[in-house]
Image (cartoon, helix red, strand yellow):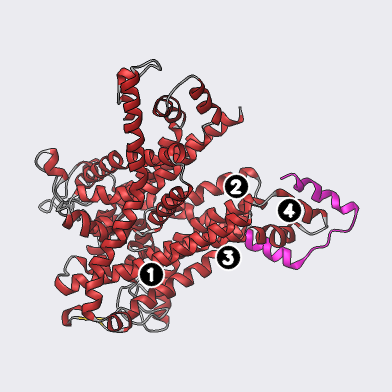
Amino acid sequence: MKTAKTEGSSGSLMKKRRRPGDMILYALIYFFSAAILCMVLYFVGYILWEGLPMLTPQFLTSAPNPIEHTEGILPALINTSYIILLSLLISVPIGVGGAVYLNEYAKNKRLIRVIEFTTETLAGIPSIIFGVFGYVFFCTALNLKVSLVSGALTLTLMVLPTIIRTMQEALKAVPKSYREGAAGLGAAKWYTIRTILLPASLPGLVTSVILAVGRIVGESAALILVAGGAAIYMPRGNLFEQLMSSGGTLSVELYRYSYSQGKNDVGFGIAAVLMLIVLLLNLVTRYISRRLEKKYQK
Amino acid sequence: MRTTGNSQTSSVHGKAHTKAMAERIMGMIFFVCGLIAVISVIFISLYMLLSGGPAIFKIGPAEFLLGTDWDPENEVFGILPMILASVVATLAAVLIAVPIGVLTAVFLSHIAQKRLAGIVRPMVDLLSGIPSVVYGLLGAILIVPLIFRLQESLSMPTGGCLLSAIIVLVIMILPTIISVSETALRAVPASYYEASMGLGASKIQSIFRAVLPAARSGIVAGMVLGTGRAIGETMAVMMVAGNAVIMPELLKPVRLLTVSIPFEWAYSSGIHREALFGVGLVLFVFIMIINFTLNGILKKGGKAE
């Protein structure tokens, strides 16, 4: 940043020589950056342009009706909400607890390294592997069948590393003086965590939840194996029965419509819904990080 | 959640006994939470081995890994074409995405003004947030028809092929490579750049000769992360790659390792299903190798600092 100013004054010492190599690299840098920018805008624009007209009230609030030949994504929306809520309900407490343990409790360096390595490993495992594991373990070994519950448990493992890492960062950002002050007043560890550290790292918690939701909403490969597809009917029975039945989320239905059935118009409708969700999540994370920046600048 | 735990000890001067008890219990709960990741990885490794191993030995490791025919109806399970397709697609995607990604990272970290970088960076973040099925749909609608025209001119129109899979993978791993490289470039002390400029080097020279080499380990880490992403990607490539199990050729349909699992899952049973578990195990081994490589690089990078 600072050096940009000095560049102009170098003319007094020596003539600025234009290097052809520099020019080529400049051109490539600007070209690729502009290309990526245009590509993103084009993708988002294309999806919304093709998909938004599909989003009629009927499309959003009904189940597919084969007799009247209408499509609807309400079952998929409900399944998606169930899976999001259930996964968060399990993964957030565990993830936050794991981060607290790593940051506040763990003393054994080797153990910390093992936990951090396995967290990284978990983050690097592709979703289809989680799908196979989830099928063998949750659906078969624990006999939860192909169901929304199996899907939520599988997704819990997938979002856990994100939550742990984000919360760890947030806890690290809490000044040491907070902990020392609390300890000086005679507060015990859990008391300090509960009343000071967790409230202070609330933005981190919100960010980790948003990142997790983004991952859950976009997931498809694993869910096809563990939660099933074809959200044709509205979920039936009591909550427990609904959660124990199979059902496709929005992403799974997008795949089923556009790839298995060739109904790309419905596919784009769902893609537009997904895109709107992703855009919203992105805006919220940006808002939070901006507010944090301001807070730390003070 | 936790804050509602034990309300009677909410003051510093609670009952000493219950408080100490709560402290100990919470400490234990946090410890268990910390171990969940470790337990998960152990369980995943174990169950992948238990589910995939038997099939590989039933079919025969050599026949499974080196066989070139995949014909589930006749119980012939050779996955060499899939392994090669996955490796070729991943390597090609990484080789294309790394230069583009690093140049964009340079743009974001050293060339763009703060305001411009503030516009481009969220766009890159957005790219990483788009679900893979949406990439698959976009690829099928925007990229496959273009390639179809190219194939028509060569009189072998098939639609989805290795090339379309590579293009989609490049787009999907770019955000990872860009953001990891940018972080690495920013972590290089400004004095490197300033010293190089002070010696009379041009801006580009300073970036590429002084800053970039210093950020090397971070960039390599981004590359390995991108490799892991690419080799594990499933839905998007399934929707654009044609999915025929033949030896990979640029303009012919290919089936990647990952794709076989959801592609044949619904109608597989018996030894066929087990063979799919075997495919999963092979993929898992690939991923673990990549993970350990990444860990090694990060450790080395950490020491160098």
Looking at the rendering, the stretch of residues picked out in magenta corresponds to A1-29
Q: Which residue is mark 4?
A: B193
Q: Which residue is mark 3?
A: B99
Choose mark 3 or mark 1, whichever is in front.
3
Report helix, strand or loop for mark 2.
Answer: helix
Image quadrant for the C terminus of chain A? top right
Q: Earlier along the polypeptide chain: callout 2 or callout 4? A: 2
Dominant secondary structure of the magenta stretch? helix
Q: Nearer the viewer, residue A148 or B128?
A: A148
Tell me which chain the residue with mark 2 is part of: B
Label pair 1/4, CB-CB below 8 angstroms = no
A69 with respect to A190 (left or right): left
Q: Earlier along the polypeptide chain: callout 1 or callout 4? A: 1
Q: State the image coordinates of residue B268 (x, y, percent, origin top left).
A: 17, 70
Q: Earlier along the polypeptide chain: callout 2 or callout 1? A: 2
Report helix, strand or loop for mark 1.
Answer: helix
The residue depicted at 44 percent of the width and 60 percent of the height is B172
Quick check: can you spot residue A249? no
Q: Give the amino acid type for the residue marked by disc 4 in the picture.
A: Tyr
- Mark 2 and mark 1: Cα distance apart in space: 33 Å
Label pair 3/1, CB-CB below 8 angstroms = no
Residue B145 numbered tag:
1
